[in-house]
Image (tube, rainbow, N blue to C red):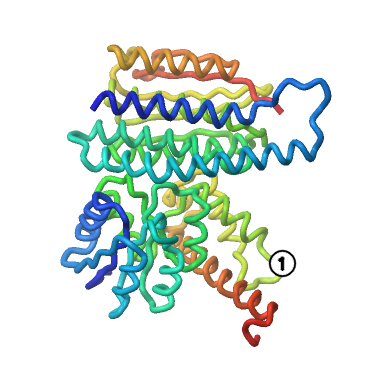
């Protein structure tokens, strides 16, 4: 069964790269004409639609089967998080670039549902006056993945019963803090190590930083800081 | 609230088994008729089922047309989907579906969602809430049954920010039941809105006498 996780992981990574690469501007000496830009965007959108339909039908169905036939709850949770990765790649990238607010709302909603399924509560602290910063899809994807992995670790390694998210924005920088009340210390073991490396790599991609600290009331605090570009 | 019979439409056997199980947990004793295609489903519409659970990605077409037919007969239509911000889901809601369930939920989670929708407490994801806000636009200056009331718009804004129904209730000091009622009204306005638009559009094109 492990090979199947690895295969889906590689396939999703490949698709994510293809979808993101299509949006990167080629190096040109003169700025592209608005018409060319529009045509390029439309071609990319059609390509995404085609990939979406393939993935929606095929991968979605297979992941559901893994969830339905999971021999234990943590297998089902892992398959669900793969499905969530799939959702990020195909559905979120289909709409217009979201705002920071939209992305945080989706993260919050996903976290609430995921934690409710295992009986863990979530406290979400976010300022009311969040700046209306756009967040490009590639950056949003990294943020989703980092938070998802952090929650996976909190649930799997520490069996946390309570999670708290604290968001602060200042001077065009976002601070995203996730604290659990479980057993203290960073996750051990092979999968913990790979997850941590992946989170660090993504934080790098965001030109940000990530750190693991002991929580002030016990447990572990994951602190991600990243610049917000206007 | 319970139902005597249900129609289940999904092209994948393991999905049907999962959804059938959820239906039986939500409404013990319910009789479930199953179809794996739109064509087969159309043969199971008489007598009208009390409830229909429909997957949109069927091999022989989009489930939305089936929803429209069933909703007109008074069947409670619920969409089963993997993606909750899918454009197709929004279209199904416009055709009269009164809620949706996510197929990757646990069986008990699914049963809760089904029971919730049956008692008029449909779920609403932030992305669907954002679509609804874009669709309805700001509340009209003069109260108008087709548009959202200011309170409904406020509720939708909070849902769009990721608040749960309970959190919205706490913010406005209302009961969870009342907030759920607002969501149900919003869904109803969406499909009424859409039927009215469709009728007006048809009249404009001279297809139907206004």
- Chain ID at mark 1: B
Is A182 drawn above or below residue B115 in the view shown?
A: above
Describe the element under mark 1 as helix, strand or loop: loop
Q: Quadrant of residue A156?
A: top left
Q: Which residue is drawn at 28% across and 37% down?
A: A118
Q: Which residue is drawn at 44% across and 19% down?
A: A222
Q: Does residue B115 show up?
A: no
Residue B135 in percent (x, y) is at 62, 58
In the image, A74 versus B40, the foreground residue is B40
Residue B170 in percent (x, y) is at 46, 50
Q: Quadrant of the C terminus of chain A?
A: top right
Image side of residue A15 versus residue A187, left or right = right
Is B151 drawn above or below residue A125 in the view shown?
A: below
Residue A182 in percent (x, y) is at 30, 22
In the image, A76 versus A112, the foreground residue is A76
Q: Which residue is drawn at 17% across and 35% down?
A: A71
Is A192 drawn above or below residue A140 in the view shown?
A: above
Q: Residue at x 57, y 53 (%)?
A: B131
Q: Quadrant of the N terminus of chain A?
A: top left
Residue B169 in percent (x, y) is at 46, 53
Mark 1 packing: few (<14 Cα in 10 Å), some, or many (20+)? few
Q: Does residue B209 show up?
A: yes
Number of numbered labels in the structure image: 1
Image side of residue B81 versus residue A52, left or right = left
Residue to which mark 1 is pinned: B141
């Amino acid at each position: 069964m492990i090979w199947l996780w690895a295969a889906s992981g590689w396939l999703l990574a490949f698709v994510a790269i293809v979808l993101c690469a299509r949006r990167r501007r080629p190096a040109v000496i003169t700025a592209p004409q608005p018409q060319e830009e529009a045509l390029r965007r439309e071609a990319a959108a059609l390509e995404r639609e085609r990939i979406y339909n393939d993935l929606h039908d095929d991968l979605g169905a297979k992941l559901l089967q893994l969830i339905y036939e999971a021999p234990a709850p943590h297998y089902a949770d892992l398959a669900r998080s793969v499905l969530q990765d799939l959702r990020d790649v195909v559905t979120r990238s289909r709409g217009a670039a979201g705002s920071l607010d939209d992305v945080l709302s989706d993260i919050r909603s996903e976290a609430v549902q995921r934690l409710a399924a295992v009986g863990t509560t979530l406290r979400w602290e976010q300022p009311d006056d969040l700046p209306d910063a756009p967040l490009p899809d590639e950056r949003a994807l990294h943020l989703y993945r980092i938070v998802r992995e952090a929650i996976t670790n909190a649930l799997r390694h520490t069996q946390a019963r309570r999670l708290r998210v604290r968001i602060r924005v200042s001077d065009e920088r976002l601070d995203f803090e996730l604290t659990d009340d479980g057993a203290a210390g960073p996750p051990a073991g092979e999968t913990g190590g790979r997850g941590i490396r992946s989170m660090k790599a993504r934080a790098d991609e965001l030109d940000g930083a990530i750190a693991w600290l002991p929580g002030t009331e016990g447990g572990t605090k994951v602190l991600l800081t990243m610049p917000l570009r206007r | 609230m319970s139902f005597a019979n249900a129609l289940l439409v999904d092209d994948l056997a393991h999905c049907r088994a999962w959804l059938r199980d959820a239906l039986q947990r939500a409404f013990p004793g319910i009789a479930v008729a199953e179809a794996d295609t739109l064509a087969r489903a159309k043969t199971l519409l008489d007598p009208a089922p009390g409830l229909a659970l429909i997957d949109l990605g069927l091999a022989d077409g989009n489930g939305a047309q089936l929803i429209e037919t069933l909703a007109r007969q008074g069947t409670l239509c619920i969409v089963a989907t993997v993606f909750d911000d899918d454009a197709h889901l929004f279209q199904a809601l416009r055709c009269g579906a009164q809620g949706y369930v996510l197929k990757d939920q646990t069986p008990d989670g699914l049963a809760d969602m089904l029971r919730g929708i049956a008692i008029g407490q449909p779920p609403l994801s932030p992305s669907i809430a954002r679509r609804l806000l874009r669709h309805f636009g700001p509340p009209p200056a003069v109260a108008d049954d087709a548009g959202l009331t200011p309170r409904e718009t406020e509720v939708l804004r909070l849902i769009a920010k990721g608040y749960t129904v309970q959190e919205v209730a706490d913010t406005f000091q209302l009961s969870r039941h009342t907030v759920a009622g607002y969501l149900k009204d919003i869904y109803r306005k969406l499909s009424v809105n859409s039927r009215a638009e469709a009728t007006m559009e048809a009249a404009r094109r001279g297809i139907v006498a206004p």
